[in-house]
Image: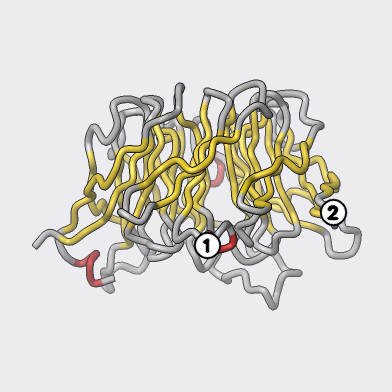
Amino acid sequence: MELLDSNVDLREVQKLEGHADRVWGLAWNPAPHNCGGASAMLASCSGDKTVRIWQMGPNRQWECSTILEDTHTRTVRSCAWSPCGKFLATASFDSTTAIWKYVGGDFECVATLEGHENEVKSVSWSSSGMFLATCSRDKTVWIWEVQPGDEYDCVAVLQGHSQDVKMAQWHPLVDVLVSVSYDNSIKVWSEDGDSDDWHCVQTLNEGSSGHTSTVWSVSFNSRGDRMVTSSDDLTLKIWDTSSAISQKDTESFAPWRHLCTLSGYHGRTIFSAHWSSEGVIASGAGDDALCLFVEEKDDAVDEPSYRLLLKKEKAHEMDINTVRWNPKDWRHLASASDDGTIKIWELREIS
């Protein structure tokens, strides 16, 4: 982490081309060795109705190894790997979520999750691998329980948002879900240990120092005691649970509180924010720029604050829809854009 105390640059390593429309979502495989022994694997999804699997070749160049097609009939908006790395979930504007399984060197569609009345905007696996969450323009969040034999049962339909739900993301340590919406709010959902019912345990909105416009994304730090949200109001907000959620104490809910707001860094909607394993927050926006933020190490200040580490103007030629840090190699960041490309970036020290 000494790197972050010095002058750094975000260097473009490679531009990945192949999608015939805007690229919406990205997902790094957390256990690529379970898919044929790959050293690194990235999935991308697009308005061209396909999902592409990218792998690093022996020459250290990224190549498209597989195209998953002929399953979704409209835009594929979001993709997510299971914790074991053998399953990929893809969410589409065709109202379905497909589950792909790596079998014998290939990806097979083993399940199609149906039920949403409208476009599915996001999909996320729980850290336990037991649950899948999908959210939709139909204002609902669905929780699916993974069953033996590649079966998925809907165990809850969460109704609480009054508008399109943009993203649902599981907490990295416990089975707590956070959703963000066009209704400007962030909702935290948890299972009642006695009844197995899921319910909203907290809503963060303008009254709780929340966003004043559509919330597009949410991401947790590795400890799970902070999260960052990004919005149409041109801000990033950092939220904190002072009593960190631990795996030993999943019964009691620790409420989130607003920690700080990062504003003035992007000139248009911030579509994506992602927290790296080493504590660097990346953001990508409609101004075609990437920003990186780190916590300010100042003992004189009581409340933690965050500072801009660097800004990369014109990182893409059009809107940046998603940014994702590689969980296996914290210096590498992937970004996806309306320009139809994916870029791999490396955070490096300037000598």
Q: Nearer the viewer, residue 160 or 176?
A: 176
Residue type at numbered disc 2:
Gly
Instruction: Point out residue 55 in the picture as x, y percentages from the top left corner.
Output: 44, 49
In primary-sequence order, the first of circles 2 and 1 is 1
* Figure quadrant of residue 58: bottom left
For the residues labelled 2 and 1, say whether their Cβ atoms are less than 8 Å apart: no
Secondary structure of the residue carrying numbered label 1: loop
According to the image, label 1 marks what residue? 37
Any part of residue 210 in sight:
no
Mark pair 2, 1: CA separation: 24 Å
According to the image, label 2 marks what residue? 149
Which residue is at a point 31% across and 31% down the rendered structure image? Answer: 288
Instruction: Point out residue 267 in the picture as x, y percentages from the top left corner.
Output: 30, 30
Depicted 263 relative to depicted 24: above or below: below
Any part of residue 301 in sight:
yes
Please state if 126 lies on the left or on the right of 262 as rendered: right
Residue type at numbered disc 1:
Gly
Q: Nearer the viewer, residue 346 or 119?
A: 346
Which residue is at a point 47% across and 48% down the rendered structure image? Answer: 42
Graded by Cα atoms within 10 Å as few (under 14), some (14 to 19) or many (20 or more), the crowding at tag 1 reads few
